[in-house]
Amino acid sequence: MSRRFVAKTTAQLAAWQTASLESLDLVGLLIDGVHIGEHCLIVALGIAADGQKQALGLWDGSTENTRVCQDLLANLQSRGLRTDRSLLVILDGSKALRKAVRAIFGDAALVQRCQVHKMRNVLEYLSDRDRPWAQAILRRAYQATDVKKAQRLLLDLARRLEDEYPSAAESVREGLEETLTVQGLGLPERLQRSLTTTNAAESVISRTRHVKRNVKRWRGGKMMLRWVAAGVLEAVKGFRRLKGHRDMPTLVATLRARDQRLGLTTAEEKVA
């Protein structure tokens, strides 16, 4: 590996991790941890008001690590990410990450727990015999546009699992309301599906595989960060807007109405 490449990728990563976010009109924040070999990286994506995805940063660490979660959110805040108005925050289910989000954003954060992560967690407790029918119910619940119907399906599933699979039943109930946050907003179905999982983060990392193939052995977290960041910054050039992006004005209007209900005052409103 040439010193020139190391210097270039180090500079790219540093510039990316310190770039100002003040000009971005973000209405959503997506954070997920992805495993590469023995390492875990955390990816943060922003969702703009027009549905365009923005790569905000990459960190070495796990979303289960409280200090790492606090540091990455503090980094985003110091770079200009707004915390004075409602923001949809889509998380992988980590309790440490959720706690850090609440500490930074307070009531401004509207938290959506990733439905794919929750489904995987529930199904891991079940036998091969019982996974298919339980998975079908979970999918029906998460695809429902009526949040009350989704709640009924999930609570009924928890009751059915209670005797034979108490841990699975507990997993269904744990964070249940936050897995249905977006469904409770009454958004059009296609946009709803785009905002209920952290799949976009995993997709970003998967698009860096052509870069990672050039590495036969990772020599620590710094090297991995440099290479994956280089791949992400290349992938950014091909980013497309969210599926259902034409309905983003509905989400924006819903968030601004929430601001008014909660009495959240933006900097612009204070000036006015």
Image: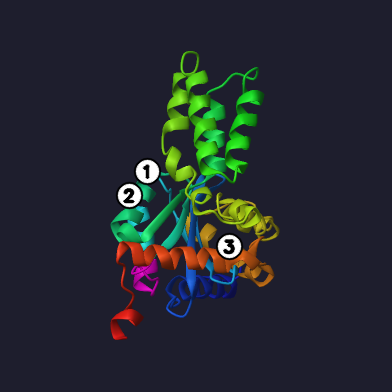
For the residues labelled 1 and 2, the Cα–Cα distance comes to 6 Å
Residue 17 spot, x, y in % from top left: 45, 70
Q: Secondary structure at mark 3?
A: helix
Q: Residue type at mark 1? A: Lys
Residue drawn where x is 32% and y is 54% of the image: 102
Please provide the residue range marked out in magenta: 74-85
- For this rendering, which residue is in front, 29 or 188? 188
Task: Tell me if residue 79 is in the magenta stretch.
Answer: yes
Q: On the image, which quarter does residue 18 sit in?
A: bottom left
Crowd tier of the residue under label 2, counting other residues whose Cα lies within 10 Å: few below 14, some 14–19, many 20 or above:
some
- In the rendered view, tell whether residue 3 sits above or below residue 90: below
The answer, for residue 56, to whether it is visible in the render is no
- For this rendering, which residue is in front, 226 or 180? 180
Residue drawn where x is 32% and y is 58% of the image: 107
Q: Residue type at mark 2? A: Lys
For the residues labelled 3 and 2, the Cα–Cα distance comes to 30 Å
Q: Secondary structure at mark 2?
A: helix
Residue 236 spot, x, y in % from top left: 63, 69
Residues under numbered marks 3 and 2 in contact, where contact means CB atoms less than 8 Å apart: no
For the N terminus, give its image quadrant: bottom right
Q: Secondary structure at mark 1?
A: helix
Residues under numbered marks 1 and 2 in contact, where contact means CB atoms less than 8 Å apart: yes
The answer, for residue 238, to whether it is visible in the render is yes
Q: Which residue is mark 2?
A: 99
Q: Which residue is mark 1?
A: 95
Q: Which residue is mark 3?
A: 227
Say left or right for 259 vs 252. Answer: left
- In the rendered view, tell whether residue 67 sits above or below residue 52: above
Crowd tier of the residue under label 1, counting other residues whose Cα lies within 10 Å: few below 14, some 14–19, many 20 or above:
some
Of the residues tagged 1 and 3, which is closer to the observer?
1
